[in-house]
Amino acid sequence: GLCLFNCGIGLNSMNVLKNPDFSRFQVALFSGLFGALNALIFGNRTLLRYLLNVVTEDLLRDALRSLYPRNPDRVDEQLVESFYRPAKTGGDGGVDVVAQIYTNEAGYTPMEYHDRYKDLLDSLPLHLIWGTADVVTPLTGDVGVFYCDRVANNRSGKQTTSIELVDAGHLLFDEKPEEVHASMFKWLNRKVVT
């Protein structure tokens, strides 16, 4: 079986262009926006290097805390340092990582995986644990709606998909580890072990 946490649209935001509900205008608008960002910022090594130098530990701490809305105290000095130090001391490697996050191929969307590997994914127990306060991949987004529909309408035909909500943000497994682990172990005992 598979256990997923706040399943995202892909490896970066580029997959929003595959949203079937987008009009041609919306796709063109977002394509232009992504193209401009890639050309002006993420493809500009000098600017990226400058931006990485502008980032302070306080700015990074605040950004990380926004991902932990229910338990911001989980953002400790060790977590901040784990992001801050490589960006400051990584030289061109830090610049390369930031550029790749935004410009690399986003990969398949979860919906494309389900189309491509339908028989396999329909046969596996699938459990999603989703943060109700996630603003990065909200349950009301394309992927959340896809999985909610999959559960509500038994799309696999085998009742193999389940979703459990946790009062947490995008990094729910770190923000509320006890609740997330309890959900995962309860599912494992119910679906996989038995």
Image (cartoon, helix red, strand yellow):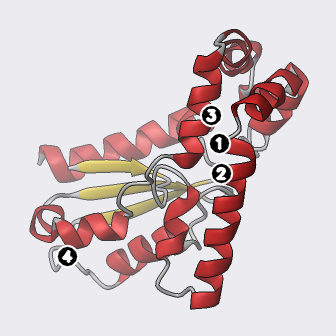
| Of pointers 1 and 4, the one earlier in the residue sequence | 1
Residue 47 appears anywhere in the view? yes
Q: Residues within 10 Å of mark 4 (few under 14, many from 20)?
A: some
Disc 1/disc 3 C-alpha distance (Å) = 10 Å
| Of pointers 1 and 3, the one earlier in the residue sequence | 1
| Of pointers 4 and 2, the one earlier in the residue sequence | 2
Determine which residue is flagged by label 1. 43
Residue visible at 33% across and 48% down in the picture = 3
Using the image, tell me which numbered label, if any, was put on residue 156.
4
Residue visible at 32% across and 85% down in the picture = 153
The x and y percentages for residue 25 are: 64, 88
Q: Are marks 1 and 2 in contact (CB under 8 Å)?
A: yes
Determine which residue is flagged by label 3. 98
The amino acid type of the residue labelled 1 equals: Gly
Q: Secondary structure at mark 1?
A: loop
* Depth order, front residue of 186/131: 131
The amino acid type of the residue labelled 2 equals: Asn
The amino acid type of the residue labelled 3 equals: Val
